[in-house]
């Protein structure tokens, strides 16, 4: 005879209610500096998320503001979701003379 805890046997119904027991997809947001447009632009697998910002802190604030609703509305995810954030750009620095 096998026994299941109530947590284990409720995974299916919890998942249907939007709980995220075993997230199949890992979410990421890449911020890339567009030197020509002088903005940070996003590349992401979060459905519907498109971000453009003048500064990296603005970019991060927009991701924090927009991503939770988009994950809920477009992916049916509720609760905390880890999102990997990476930024890439080139800085032109003036070396001291």
Image (cartoon, helix red, strand yellow):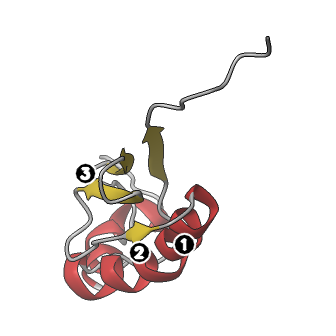
Q: For marks 2 and 3, give the CA distance.
A: 15 Å
Judged left or right of residue 48, residue 65 is right
Report whether residue 80 is seen: no
Q: For marks 2 and 1, give the CA distance.
A: 6 Å
Q: Quadrant of residue 57?
A: bottom right
Residue 82, percent across and down? 49, 54
* Label whose residue precedes the other's in the sequence (2 or 3): 3
Residue 82's label in the rendered image is none
Q: Nearer the viewer, residue 19 or 9?
A: 19
| Extreme residue in the right direction | 97
Secondary structure beneath label 3: loop
Q: Nearer the viewer, residue 35 or 69?
A: 35
| Extreme residue in the top direction | 97
| Residue underneath mark 2 | 67
Q: Which residue is depicted at the point 59% across and 72% down?
A: 61
Report whether residue 2 is seen: yes
Residue 64's label in the rendered image is 1
Q: Nearer the viewer, mark 2 or mark 3?
A: 2
Vertical arrangement, residue 53 with respect to residue 31, above or below: below
Residue 13, percent across and down? 29, 79
Q: Quadrant of residue 93?
A: top right
Circles 2 and 1 in contact, beta carbons < 8 Å? yes
Q: Which residue is depicted at the point 27% across and 65% down?
A: 46
Q: Which residue is depicted at the point 39% across and 52% down?
A: 3
Query: Badge 2: how crowded within 10 Å, few (<14), some, or many (20+)?
Result: many
Query: Badge 3: how crowded within 10 Å, few (<14), some, or many (20+)?
Result: few
Residue 25's label in the rendered image is 3
């Amino acid at each position: 005879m096998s026994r299941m805890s109530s947590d284990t046997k409720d995974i299916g119904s919890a998942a249907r209610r939007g709980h995220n027991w075993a997230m199949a997809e890992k979410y990421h947001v890449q911020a890339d500096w567009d030197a020509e447009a002088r903005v940070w632009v996003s590349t992401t697998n979060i459905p519907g998320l498109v971000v453009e910002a003048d500064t990296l802190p603005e970019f991060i604030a927009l991701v924090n503001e927009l991503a939770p609703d988009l994950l809920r509305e477009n992916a049916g995810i509720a609760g905390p979701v880890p999102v990997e954030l990476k930024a890439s750009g080139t800085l032109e620095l003036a070396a001291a003379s």
